[in-house]
Amino acid sequence: MRRPTGKVVGIIKRNSRPLCGMLMPSPIKEATRHLFTPADRRMPRVRVETRQAASLQAHRIVVAIGGWLRHSRYPNVRLHRDAPDACFEQG
């Protein structure tokens, strides 16, 4: 069976809409990189770099994708703010 193949050579316009979700704690005690699980299951998990992970674990937060390195499994994001409960009702 033939499958279409191709290679991304550039991005013309970046669509970085905010993602709502929760921060998952890292198994490493002093880690600054943690995984963020979006409420919308169609979106991938992303990596958040923060030193405030302990205080953010109990909150819903909003992030936006900032970049995705070529050899990285997860994109990097920017932390925006605490999310209201209405954020989860949209998805």
Image: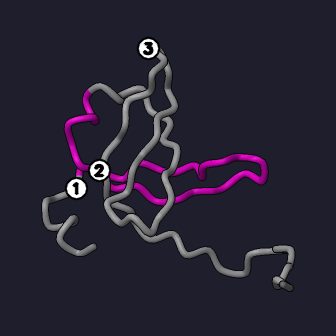
Q: Is residue 57 above or below residue 14?
A: above
Tell whether 73 sits left or right of 6: left
Residue at image point 31% right, 60% down = 39
**Counting other residues with Cα less than 10 Å from the Cα at mark 3, is it few (<14), some (14-19), or many (20 or more)?**
few
Residue at left offset 35%, top offset 28%: 52
Q: Amino acid at mark 3?
A: Lys
Q: Quick one: SS at disc 3? A: loop
Q: Which residue is mark 2?
A: 61
Residue 13 placement (x, y as % from top left): 65, 80
Q: Which mark is residue 83?
A: 1
Q: Amino acid at mark 1?
A: Ala
State which region is magenta: 55-82
The numbered dot on residue 46 is none
Secondary element type, mark 2: strand
Q: Is residue 2 left or right of residue 69?
A: right
Q: Quadrant of residue 68?
A: bottom right
Residue at 86% x, 79% y is 6
Q: Does the magenta segment cover residue 67?
A: yes
80 and 59: which is toward the camera: 59
Give the amino acid at mark 2.
Ile
Q: Are marks 2 and 1 in contact (CB under 8 Å)?
A: yes
- In the current view of this chain or complex, which residue is farthest to the front? 1
The question of residue 77 being in magenta is answered with: yes
Quarter of the image where the C terminus is located? bottom left
**From the viewer's perspective, is residue 51 above or below residue 89?**
above
The label on residue 29 is 3
Give the distance between the C-alpha atoms of the residues marked 2 and 1, in whole angstroms: 5 Å
